[in-house]
Structure formats: structure tokens, C-alpha cells
Image (cartoon, rainbow, N blue to C red):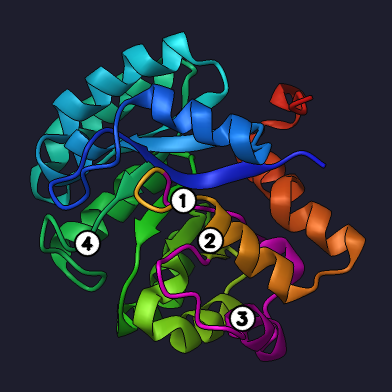
Amino acid sequence: MPIIDVHAHVGRWQFHLSTGGAEVNVAQMDKYGIDLQLVSASEGVVFDAVAGNEALRADLERHPRLYGYAVVNPNRIEESADDLKRCLATGRFVGAKIHTAYPGRLPGTRQMAEAFDLVAEAGVPLLLHTWGREVERLPGMLEARPGLRVIMGHAGGEAWQEAAHAAAACDRLYLEHCRTLTNAGRIAYARGAGVDIGQILFGTDASLIDPCVSLGVIRDARFAPDELERVLWRNAAELFGLGEAITPVA
């Protein structure tokens, strides 16, 4: 069965020395049978969005199984607006990525609202780092932006229950459950809260976290065969328009 990983990174992080360049991502993909991976640049997330996006562009050209998120910095919205256009014009970037901790902006701030407006205007999905009860603000923010689709990266982190209810309240919010602590029952809780199977995506946080962790979470969720297909690749293929790019690994 094909697999699309919607949450990964290229590059080293200051707190994890086993990460590396795109070759590390591809090696892990080969090991676990991941067909396509959507990545953002570590440099772009933690330091310089524009420089990180530019460096990632070269990696995407060398590795056709990788697709990019252009990092948007809520604190430099005009700079990010121009950069997002440049990235999307390449055809190798298919979405936007916004962190909350590094720029110090949460949903509810003026800067994050402007960043959401920017991504909504671009018409691409947004992967948003979520790690707290700020997820409760997201249904209202999406109601004000009818075309915007947001993936809650880490499914709210410690606020995974609140994230589940937020997704149940808005069908343009998606849950992606990667993190180091697996919290058994998170997916079952989300389904019980009313989250549709079409709103659950597979992500790994590679190469910070070995993909085996997220694959184990999916296994333990005990999806029916048709549900597993939706979660592992079909939902992502529809969201990002990647159906024709799927070529299963032998």
C-alpha cells in the first residue's frame, strides 16, 4: 500500500544530532516503504525562513519523492508573502508550514491571523505546529477563511483531546499525530469525538523521530482496510493533489 508522510523536515536541529540532509530522509523512506514525503527546511523553521526555503528548493530538485512546505514567518509577513509566491511557482512546493514556538506567535495573535490570510490567499494547505489549547481557536479562524485547510501537526501535542474536538467542529482541520510520546488511544478518542476518517493524515516528524514510531501508532489504531488506505495515502493525495505522483516502492 502506498504511504505519504505529510510531516517531515530536512536538515539538522540544534537538539538532535542524528538528523541530516535529504539523503537521510530518503534512506528512511526506503527502509519503511514511504513513497512520498512532505518536508520543510529545519533552517527555515528555526532561523531564516527565506534562506531555508531556498536551500530546500535544491533538495527538492534532486529528490523527486520529496515535496516541500514553504515556511512562513508570521513576524515577517511581507517577506514571506513574496517568498511563498516564489516557492509555489516552482511546482515543487505544495503547501505552507508555520511554527508557533520559534516565532513566538500563537493562533489568536494579529501576526498569526495575517499569516493565515496569506496562506488562504495562496490556496494551499497549511501544516501548523500545534502544542496546546490554542487549537480551540482554529475552527473560528477557519470559519473566517472559507478556503483554508489546516493540518494540526502533532494533533495538538499535549492538547490532543482539544485538537480532536476542534477537528470534529470543522471539516477543514486535519489531525496528524506524530510525536515522541504515543499516548495510546489518541486516534480512537478522535474518532469517538466525531472526526471523520478523511481528516486523519499520516506524519512522522522525520528525521527527528524514526518513522517506526508513527507507523506503530497507525498499527495500534486498528483501522479497517479501507480506512487504512485513506489515512496512509489517499487523504494526503487528495489534499495536496499528489495522486499522479504515487509510485509505490518495490
Callout 2 amino acid? Val
Task: Name the residue: 72% across, 74% down.
Answer: 221
Location of the N terminus (image quadrant): top right
Mark 4 vs 1, N-terminal side: 4
- Mark 3: few/some/many CA within 10 Å (<14, 14-19, 20+): many
Quarter of the image for residue 244 reads top right
Residue 145 position (above or below residue 196): above
Query: How far apart in space, not on screen, are marks 4 and 1 (Cα)?
Result: 23 Å
Q: Are marks 4 and 1 in contact (CB under 8 Å)?
A: no
Mark 3 vs 1, N-terminal side: 3
Q: Are marks 4 and 2 in contact (CB under 8 Å)?
A: no
Query: How far apart in space, not on screen, are marks 3 and 1 (Cα)?
Result: 29 Å
Residue holding disc 2: 213
Mark 4 vs 2, N-terminal side: 4
Q: Which mark is residue 168?
A: 3
**SS assignment at label 2:** helix
Q: Position of residue 88 (x, y in %)?
A: 41, 23
Query: How far apart in space, not on screen, are marks 3 and 4 (Cα)?
Result: 22 Å
**Is 158 on the left or on the right of 215, as rendered?**
left
Callout 1 amino acid? Asp
Q: Are marks 1 and 2 in contact (CB under 8 Å)?
A: yes
Residue holding disc 1: 210
Q: Position of residue 170 (x, y in %)?
A: 57, 74
Q: Are marks 2 and 3 in contact (CB under 8 Å)?
A: no
**Is 107 on the left or on the right of 15, as rendered?**
right
Residue holding disc 4: 100
Q: Position of residue 225 (x, y in %)?
A: 90, 60
Q: Nearer the viewer, mark 3 or mark 4?
A: 4
Magenta residue span: 177-206
